[in-house]
Image (cartoon, rainbow, N blue to C red):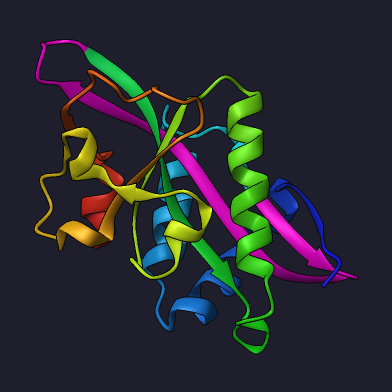
Amino acid sequence: MKLHIRPETAAEFPAIYELNALAFGQDNESRLVDKLRDTPFFIPELSIVAYAGEYLVGYILLTRLPLKGDDGLTYETLALAPVSVTPALHQMGVGGQLIRHALKEASALGFDSVIVLGHPEYYPKFGFEKASGFGIRTSYEVPDEAFMAVELVPGALKGKAGQVAYPKAFEEVG
């Protein structure tokens, strides 16, 4: 499916809210996106929409995510959340195109890694692997195989074992 993928505009905020609510069957992700837009973790270029013709069919957001290293240093990675696709187009490659595009854009902006809490059968297709393999933890109680990381630059997470510190917005809507 041919998509036009680009950063969001403010005029699209209501449509993005609706798409996320429809895709997830509730509005937690929609509220999360709205809250994250008003934080220093938000990166406008990484709040990305996908259109099929004139229809908004997908959305993805990558935000800054501090990684508090066991060595006492704080590193920066990105959190991927959410990625949403209009339900009628599931299994049509929209999510994959969004993820590949977002990872490429993140790399172009100088970011070297991304963390996701998601489906362990889906994200490995895009290079994600268990974050625990890098020594990276989260404070959330989640299955090890669902908490994943990808290096956009080979070796980017080497020596950066520690715990990610999700922005407060994640707790406020979960």
Residue 169 rendering spot, x and y as whole percentages: 30, 47
Q: Is residue 54 magenta?
A: yes
Residue 30 rendering spot, x and y as whole percentages: 46, 64
- 124 w.r.t. 73: above or below: below
Do we see residue 130 in this rendering?
yes
Task: Please identify the quarter of the rendering in which residue 2 is found.
Answer: bottom right
Image point (68%, 47%), residue name = 101
Q: In the figure, is residue 164 to the left or right of 9? A: left
Q: In the figure, is residue 62 to the left or right of 137? A: right
Q: In the figure, is residue 15 to the left or right of 141? A: right
Image point (80%, 65%), residue name = 51
Image point (67%, 71%), residue name = 93
Image point (45%, 38%), residue name = 63
Image quarter where the N terminus lies is bottom right
Residue 145 rendering spot, x and y as whole percentages: 23, 60
Q: In the figure, is residue 84 to the left or right of 70? A: right
Span shown in magenta: 48-73
Residue 161 rendering spot, x and y as whole percentages: 17, 26
